[in-house]
Image (cartoon, rainbow, N blue to C red):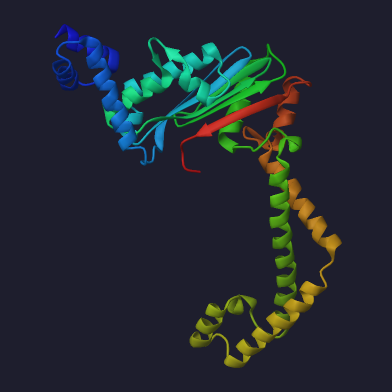
Amino acid sequence: MADISKLRTMTGAGMMDCKKALTEAEGNFDKAVELIRKRGQAIAAKRSDRDAAQGCVLAAANGDFAAIVALKCETDFVAKNADFVALTKQILDKAMEVKPASLEALNSLMIGNSSVQQLITDRSGVTGEKMELGAYEFVNGPATLAYIHPGNMLASIVAFNEAGLDTQVYKDVAMQVAAMNPIAVDEAGVPAEYVAKEREIATEKTKAELVQKQVDGALSKAGINPAHVDSEAHIESNIEKGWITAEQAAKAREIKETVGAQAAANLKQAMIDGIVNGRIQKIYKEQTLLNQAFIKEAKINVAQYMASVSKSLTCTSFKRFTLNQE
């Protein structure tokens, strides 16, 4: 019984699993540990194609370093298990201690006699669920703060250029990151490929809207409600309902084709560029941290909020990770 208890403490396996392993190992404790670990690896391999969409997300900050760790599993039941949360915390503590440069490096770190990856595999053997280290993020700066949203499914970490201020200021910004999910600190941090893609989308949308505006005007002038002929399906349906006549439907199709083609051929590039630039600026305002409306006081943005505390205070970097569906 003493060996069974010791084996349970070391591996987290169930009592019957420990008893079985010790019996198969003929009392050889090290071999019993190996058997349990191999079974954990077998379970992990067997369930490798499963979706580990649940889990525990924890974060911590200490001075100039903050980190997020997410340990993923298959079910909410396991994610809320005290031992699973404790393992996530153990991995986070190791990350805070060593400050590894990557998720792969964190997986390789030793905690006691086992690597982080081995501990996860062992725990997978206990629960019978696929588990994996789903995320490891970190930031550095003169001041850092970590925020964990209730439920352990979402966390954010933020680095600042000034230390020694009221902790609430740092927390407010970290909560902003968690709540509003910005894509960058400011305009300069938005990836060029992202801007190019958004500009392409905005350009096509703007052209379509400008053409549609002229088509709708022509339809209205002809006494046809644009909403009644906005698609072929609607046209046929509205003829059956008696809302438009077959003649009006034919006229609408003619207007849409001729006026649409003419409008598209005569679009002014300067007008398109102006509208597109406005839409890009809106993206910067809504999706970059410093330009976002401050969640506690929408009349000011985050940069203005920080400036109200210290004129030189700013956020230098942030990370956010969530297992929630967004």
In the image, residue 173 lies at what x, y percent? Answer: 63, 27
Q: Quadrant of residue 52?
A: top left
How many marks the image carries: the answer is: 0
Residue located farthest toward the top when viewing the structure as drawn: 2
Q: Looking at the image, which residue is at 42% across and 12% down?
A: 111
Q: Is residue 197 left or right of residue 246?
A: right
Asked if residue 274 lies left or right of residue 57, the reply is right
Q: Position of residue 119 (x, y in %)?
A: 37, 20
Q: Tell me which residue sits at (58%, 90%) in the image.
A: 245
Q: Quadrant of residue 292?
A: top right
Taking the image as shown, residue 22 lies to the left or right of residue 321, namely left
Looking at the image, which is closer to me, 250 or 114? 114
Q: Residue at x 65, y 84 (%)?
A: 253
Camera-nearest residue between 141 and 287: 141
In the rendered structure, the answer to whether residue 114 lies left or right of residue 214 reads: left
Q: Is residue 165 above or below residue 300?
A: above
The outermost residue toward the bottom is 247
One can see residue 8 in this view = no
Residue 237 image offset from top left, x and y in percent: 50, 82
| Quarter where residue 172 is shown | top right
Res 295 visible: yes
Q: Which residue is at 56% across, 35% downward?
A: 179
Looking at the figure, which quarter contains the N terminus? top left
Compared with 35, 301 (above or below) is: below
Q: Position of residue 70 (x, y in %)?
A: 46, 28
